[in-house]
Image: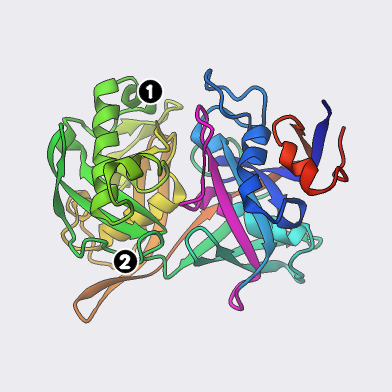
Amino acid sequence: MKQIRIPAVFMRGGTSNAVVFHARDLPRDRAQWDEIFLAAIGSPDPYGRQLDGMGGGISSLSKVCVIGPSTRPDADIDYTFAQVQVKEAKVDYSANCGNMSSAMGPFAVDEGLVKVSGKDALVRIHNTNTSKIIWSRFALDDGQSAVDGDLAIPGVSGTGSPVKLEFRDPGGATTGKLLPTGNVTDVLEVPGVGKFRVSMVDAANATVFVRAADLGLKGTETPEEIEGSAELMSKLAEIRLAASVAMGISVNRDEATKKRSVPFVGFVAPAQDAKTISGEALRGAEVDLTARVISSGQPHRALPLTVSLCTAVAARIEGTVVNQVARSNDNPEAEIRIAMPSGVLTVAAGVKQRDGHWYAEQGAFYRTQRRMFEGFVLVRASRVPGLLAATGGKRKAA
């Protein structure tokens, strides 16, 4: 049977890759999206390599983005993010991807969806997964998004032109509340595992934080060391499931197991000397805290940007487990330097108290992006028979 051709662009955003589609090129019936995305990325793959698709075998390389006209007056485009599981036939829309968010403004400009002029652009992005607004600022080069520049980001070789992402009012992206339980810390009872003092914070994406020491860890463990410990991975998975229920994301454990993206689970530790996955030395004196995160069941090689923002926000909230391990700083406007497996992420987070409640005003950081391939993604017609039926066989086939 023939293959179906769908216009697409393959892009890097920060430390992630994704296939990017125009909404106009996909079926209006979103029920058909999952099978298209699974076929395009190459999932499910029991071997975990996605060789028969565009994915790269890990969560940060198994993503799809869909861009269309904005449905809100305070935004220029709508952006829907899809996390495609590697080994399962599952697509998760419950969270946003901060890294790929950095590529969405440039995509919109380069595709003519947003008209700009001058040397710089501002694209206001409505992320439909979280109903939050992100401002994307970047340089232009002859009317197109600039690619070459001097910014180096941990986990990506070389340098690129900076994209500044400003997450506006990021609190409650998943649950509607910055502190879903109303507490800066909770004692979380994890069936079969034990009790842990955690902080459950929802900024950009909901995350449950636990101290590395409470897990018997230093906090500087590599992704390979984390993934190599079945006991640790199981413990972190159970903490995540218990937190999902405690945060109101899921009504019970069974429902929580079906939501692979949120909440994220991470462990934090004080600033300390360590080595990156590339072997470079990190000096504890030059960072504010250490963090590791599990993303879609895998240790992240860097940190998801949304979780980095959530970590920085949590570090600003007095009494959270993140705040307790972070280096103290009298300047509430100071950027927070987070040591992670690929290097150091610097995040700005504006957090204040209003009427006795914590409020996250915004968070910001810089990424780079690049369009790497444009043309068509080919998916087996046998994988998406409904796609041809929905168009009366008119969709192009190869």
Residue drawn at x 18%, y 60% is 184
Q: Which residues are magenta?
A: 72-101
Q: Quadrant of the C terminus?
A: top right
Q: Position of residue 257 (x, y in %)?
A: 35, 39
Q: Find residue 34 and report its horizontal and vertical position in percent.
A: 60, 42
In x, y percent, where is residue 385? 74, 36
Dot 2 alpha-carbon crowd within 10 angstroms: few under 14, some 14 to 19, many 20 or more: some
Q: Are marks 2 and 1 in contact (CB under 8 Å)?
A: no
Residue 309 can be seen, yes or no: yes
Amino acid type, callout 1:
Glu
- Residue indicated by mark 2: 177
Amino acid carrying mark 2 in the image: Lys
Q: Which residue is outermost to the bottom?
A: 355
Give the labeled residue for mark 1. Answer: 224
Res. 11 image quadrant: top right
Residue visible at 78% across and 43% down in the picture: 389
Direction from residue 322 to residue 202 in the image, left or right? right
Residue 98 belongs to magenta span: yes
Q: Residue at x 21, y 44 (%)?
A: 210
